Amino acid sequence: MRAGRSWRGLSAVGFLSSSALNLYGNSVHLVAVMDTVSVNQFRDNLKTIVEHVANSHVPIKVTRRAGDAFVVISADDWEREQETLYVLQNNSLMTQIAASLITHAQKTGYAPSDKEVHEITRL
């Protein structure tokens, strides 16, 4: 589905897509929204677009006439994406997460004492 967007006089077209990820039997729905601008719009509005990406944490897809494109993403978001990819590709971690999801759903997992909760939350 296409959705028109504009900020500070810059118009762009965003794309809304939704997909489902099956994570060890649990369905997780993902929604991705990305604004798209031409390389000319990007060049003419570089400061505004960079501020938008950094503040909104929404990446911008920049298209070129030749058909190829690139994505502008904040450094913080890039680092988070890399961490997420590491976890998703690590079978041992994913097995631990899946086991934790099962014990949580069954309410059979570890329950900290009031003292431990206090130490964790400092309340």
Image (cartoon, rainbow, N blue to C red):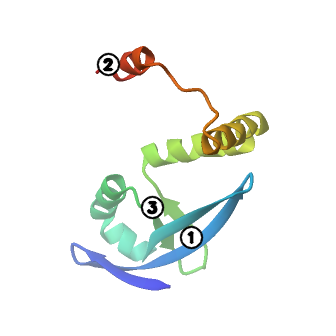
Residue 86 makes an appearance in the image: no
Q: Which mark is residue 93?
A: none
Q: Nearer the viewer, residue 75 or 30?
A: 30
* Image-quadrant location for residue 87: top right
Mark 3: which amino acid? Pro
SS at mark 3 in the image: loop
- Does residue 25 appear left or right of residue 55 in this picture? right
Q: Quadrant of the C terminus?
A: top left
Q: Label 3: how many residues lie within 10 Å, few (<14), some (14-19) or many (20+)?
A: many
The x and y percentages for residue 49 are 33, 63
Give the mark nearer the N terminus: 3 vs 2: 3
Q: Nearer the viewer, residue 61 or 120?
A: 120
The image shows residue 3, relative to residue 71, as above or below, that is below
The image shows residue 49, relative to residue 2, as above or below, that is above
Disc number lying in front (1 or 2): 2
**Residue at x-position 32% and y-position 19%:** 122
Residue 42 makes an appearance in the image: yes
The image shows residue 57, relative to residue 80, as above or below, that is below
Q: Which residue is mark 3?
A: 59
SS at mark 1 in the image: strand
Residue at the extreme left: 8
Whether residues under marks 1 and 2 lie with C-beta atoms below 8 angstroms apart, the answer is no
Q: Which residue is mark 1?
A: 69
The x and y percentages for residue 53 are 36, 58
Disc number lying in front (1 or 3): 3
- Does residue 18 appear left or right of residue 13 in this picture? right
Give the mark nearer the N terminus: 1 vs 2: 1
Q: Which residue is mark 2?
A: 122
Mark 1: which amino acid? Ala
